[in-house]
């Protein structure tokens, strides 16, 4: 078997037992990266030497019989809005070019503690604002399945890196579906954890109340392994939940069957606007789960009609506040300000440093928060969020998990939607509810439609990641989908 196709658990096991050199495995991944990266543009920064030093260190410790971690030698890519000490962190934006954090994000510390090998920082929509990874100052990432199409966003670089074999695992961030969208478009597994389960310390903020760092992998078991490593309480993050760490891998087959598990199919996720091929593959997946013993029914969540509007008002409002700190003095890019007063120098830096989509969202968010409009927009969006949460709570009294398509369509062509922001925002219609409510949601591949991957989304009540993994793993074992290395 090609080592590039090894699951992360097998890589770590082989390295620990001395059957595989961490450095040899890394070199194989780097060779693959050099071959496909010119086609994909999945990375903004490749940390080749940093990765080699780590791999050599692991091999020396194995030779001496010393203990190594759960991810020994596993190559991991990190989205470029997550801080790695001394490595440029741009968030896909010109305004942060040259910024090198002096500290590691908590998730990066936990990866390193378990001997993961970080191979680089992946491309993304600027400040995670987008669903296609076309809004990056470093050029678009391309979908490994079809180089003329988008990989999804905003964690498109992470999704493409895992699908193409440029990394075994990856971290993304999910504000309104930014892990699940590229997972669905690239044919990999991606999870948005419960809000507060994974520390956001070291994640460059876009919309604090919505975003979570999430794992991406080629199969459900690897996704569960990566979450087990990065999850857990962090006193440096005030939103971090005080919960006991869990080994999610051991929960995949506990108990082994889905008998009597109640699965609700969300009607609003399967209706108008969903491609016929996507709807058909998702129903096929639901049928497979029913054949495994699950009890399937339909559920209607009427408030979802307002979820997208509420999401964008909240996200843009929080973004307008968070991005105010980029003034040309404290971080990265600064325009030439000779002869300009402070206000004009500040305005020039932001005009030149931010892309069009970021400026659009800052302006809309500032408007929504302004005097006289706060109650009409932001406050009303918060009330809608509460209604949606109550409706999900009611649905979870009847069903253990809720399912539907991760995305209403397969990957679209580069440039197809970029001129129409509202059409692009509509792509997130099935993913934003989980962020508004703060619940876990996973995207697992379920067959192809016209040669492109389709994602099945599974959602569960807060802190029931074990349930979404269990359902996704049971479906994966039906054999309707096998990971394929692309391109």
Image (cartoon, rainbow, N blue to C red):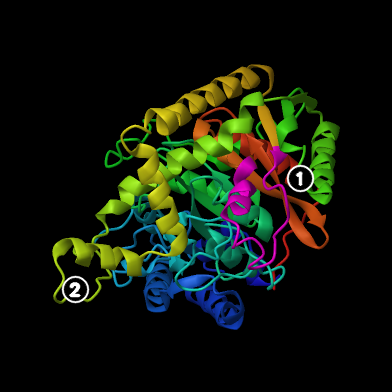
Queried whether the magenta region covers residue 215, the answer comes back as no
Relative to 138, residue 453 above or below: above
> Taking the image as drawn, is residue 44 in sight?
yes
Report whether 190 appears left or right of 195.
right
Name which residue lies at 28% across and 52% down: 324
Q: CA distance from mark 1 to mark 2?
A: 49 Å
**Pointer 2 local density, CA inside 10 Å: few below 14, some 14–19, many at least 20:** some
Q: Which residue is mark 1?
A: 274
Q: Residues within 10 Å of mark 1 (few under 14, many from 20)?
A: some
Secondary element at image label 2: loop
Please report whichever mark, 1 or 2, sits nearer to the chain's N-terminal start. 1
- Would residue 408 be counted in the magenta stretch? yes
Percent across and percent down for residue 142 are 62, 70
Residue at the front extreme of this rendering: 372
Q: Which residue is mark 2?
A: 337
Pick the front one: 403 or 255: 403
Start-end of magenta stretch: 404-429
């Amino acid at each position: 078997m090609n080592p590039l196709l090894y699951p992360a658990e097998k890589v770590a096991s082989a390295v620990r037992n001395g059957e595989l050199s961490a450095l040899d495995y890394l070199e194989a991944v780097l060779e693959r990266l050099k071959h496909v990266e010119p086609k994909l543009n999945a990375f903004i920064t490749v940390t080749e030497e940093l990765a080699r030093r780590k791999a050599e260190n692991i091999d020396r410790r194995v030779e001496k019989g010393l203990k190594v971690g759960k991810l020994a030698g596993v190559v991991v890519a990190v989205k470029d809005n997550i801080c790695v000490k001394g490595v440029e962190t741009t968030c896909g934006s010109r305004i942060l070019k040259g910024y090198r954090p002096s500290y590691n994000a908590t998730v990066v510390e936990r990866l390193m503690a378990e001997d993961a090998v970080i191979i680089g920082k992946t491309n993304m929509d600027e400040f995670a604002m987008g669903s296609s990874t076309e809004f990056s100052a470093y050029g678009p990432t391309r979908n490994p399945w079809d180089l003329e199409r988008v990989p999804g966003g905003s964690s498109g670089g992470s999704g493409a890196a895992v699908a193409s074999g440029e990394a075994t695992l990856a971290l993304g961030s999910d504000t309104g579906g930014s892990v699940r969208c590229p997972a669905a478009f690239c044919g990999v597994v991606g999870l948005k954890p419960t809000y507060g389960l994974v520390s956001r310390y070291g994640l460059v903020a876009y919309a604090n109340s919505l975003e979570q760092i999430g794992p991406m992998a080629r199969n459900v078991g690897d996704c569960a392994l990566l979450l087990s490593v990065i999850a857990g309480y962090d006193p440096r993050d005030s939103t971090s939940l005080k919960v006991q760490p869990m080994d999610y891998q051991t929960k995949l087959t506990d108990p082994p069957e889905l008998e009597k598990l109640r699965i609700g199919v969300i009607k609003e996720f399967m209706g108008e606007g969903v491609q016929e091929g996507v709807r058909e593959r998702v129903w096929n997946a639901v049928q497979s789960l029913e054949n495994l013993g699950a009890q399937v029914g339909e559920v209607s969540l009427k408030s979802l009609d307002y979820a997208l509007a509420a999401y964008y008002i909240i996200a843009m409002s929080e973004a307008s506040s968070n991005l105010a700190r980029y003034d040309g003095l404290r971080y990265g890019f600064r325009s030439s300000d000779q002869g300009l007063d402070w206000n004009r120098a500040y305005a020039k830096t932001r005009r030149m440093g931010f892309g069009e989509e970021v400026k659009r969202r800052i302006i809309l968010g500032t408007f929504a928060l302004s005097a006289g409009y706060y109650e009409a927009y932001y406050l009303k969006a918060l009330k809608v969020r509460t209604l949606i949460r109550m409706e999900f709570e009611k649905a979870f009294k009847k069903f253990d998990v809720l399912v539907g398509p991760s995305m209403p369509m397969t990957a679209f062509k580069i440039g197809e939607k970029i001129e129409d922001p509202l059409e692009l925002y509509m792509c997130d219609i099935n993913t934003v509810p989980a962020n508004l409510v703060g619940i876990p949601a996973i995207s697992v591949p379920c067959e192809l439609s016209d040669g492109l991957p389709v994602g099945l989304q599974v959602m569960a009540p807060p802190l029931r990641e074990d349930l979404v993994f269990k359902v996704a793993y049971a479906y994966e074992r039906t054999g309707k989908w096998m990971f394929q290395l692309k391109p």
